[in-house]
Amino acid sequence: MKGWPIHKSRSLLKPTRQLCAFTLIELLVVIAIIAILAALLLPGLSRAKQQAQNINCLSNLKQLQLCWHLYADDHHDFLAPNNFVYNVSSSNDFQIIGTWAPGNARVDATTDNLKAGLLFPYNTSTAIYHCPSDMSVIEDGAGNLLSQLRNRSYNMSQSVNGEGDVIDPIFGPMNQLIPCVTKYSQIRDPSPSALFVFIDENEDTLYDSQFGFPAPNSGWGNVWFDMPSNRHNQGANLSFADGHVEHWKWQVPKIFQGNIPQGVGQNELNDYNRVKNAMRQEFN
């Protein structure tokens, strides 16, 4: 009747429940789609990570290069000493008091040697001495690999005060054995824009802090004393005396064969000469 409450059946108000589930085929399709998306995305993410690491490495070298310039400004045009050399065959080092970065990168478990370097006061971040793509680890005294990453990945060219003022008791002035300059104003051939200062070195040849190269008419021929790195998409990063940085891609991978000096094959000559032309070839 009109005015009486209308009662709906409880069965009409109760929601209907339906069981939902993936079939095996649907589940396999979803997994396949996820796998395809991952295959498409992961290479792009990997390239982005490598690019970021390369930019970080270039930034490190830019900051080290600035430290190098500031040192020369503060020392009446004299360049930071670059006189730490490690003899691989005898495990001896040769160091005059004061150098840009003392120590053996393969065994240094602390950053104390970096902090003792002459460039450290101009930038007190030890992180700028290490390439983010360098996954090499330190060793103990017996040569056993440890878990800790190395503290330094970069070397300085022998062309820039590479033992230039050192007087060897047997060989005499080192600047007669190693073509180098001791003052910034002496950088003319190559020019400051073409002479590299810091280089991202191959982890298999990195010991001391000087990037060595055979001097003209030394009798060594075309060999590597130290090798550039093979990181950053088969390349290395370098900084130059005028302050700019560059990424160099190699035509041939820089792979250490087990002994230094390492001969240079015919197919590697273009890379070798490129490094050579960015170093001083004439004596003072």
Image (cartoon, rainbow, N blue to C red):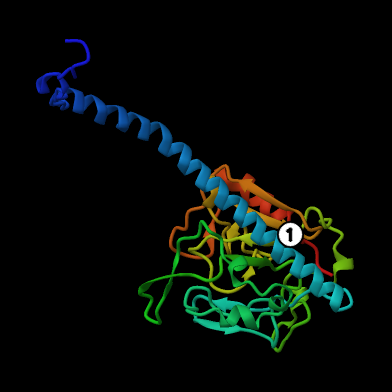
Q: Is residue 239 above or below residue 47?
A: below
Q: Does any portion of residue 93 appear in the rendered image? A: yes
Name the residue rendered at 36%, 35% in the picture. 38
Q: Is residue 38 left or right of residue 176?
A: left
How many callouts does the rendering have? Answer: 1
Name the residue rendered at 60%, 72% in the picture. 126
Q: Which quarter of the figure has residue 153?
A: bottom right
Q: Amino acid at mark 1?
A: Met
Q: Is residue 12 above or below residue 171?
A: above
Residue furthest toward the top? 1
Pick whichever, 17 or 164, lies toward us.
Answer: 17
Name the spot of residue 164 as percent of width and height, x first: 77, 76
Q: Does any portion of residue 235 appear in the rendered image? A: no
Q: Is residue 207 left or right of residue 164?
A: left
Name the spot of residue 242 as percent of width and height, x first: 81, 58
Pick whichever, 63 or 242, lies toward us.
Answer: 63
- Circle 1: element type: loop
- Which quadrant does the N terminus fall into? top left
Pick whichever, 37 or 57, lies toward us.
Answer: 37
Q: Is residue 120 left or right of residue 137?
A: right
Q: Is residue 230 above or below residue 70?
A: above
Q: Which quarter of the figure has residue 19?
A: top left
> For the residue carrying disc 1, how many other residues have a C-alpha within 10 Å: few (<14), some (14-19), or many (20+)?
many
Name the spot of residue 190 as percent of width and height, x first: 81, 56
Q: Is residue 132 left or right of residue 73?
A: left
- Which quadrant does the C terminus fall into? bottom right
Pick whichever, 30 or 88, lies toward us.
Answer: 30
Name the residue rendered at 81%, 71% in the picture. 70
Q: Which quarter of the figure has residue 67?
A: bottom right
Q: Which residue is mark 1?
A: 279
Name the residue rendered at 25%, 31% in the picture. 31
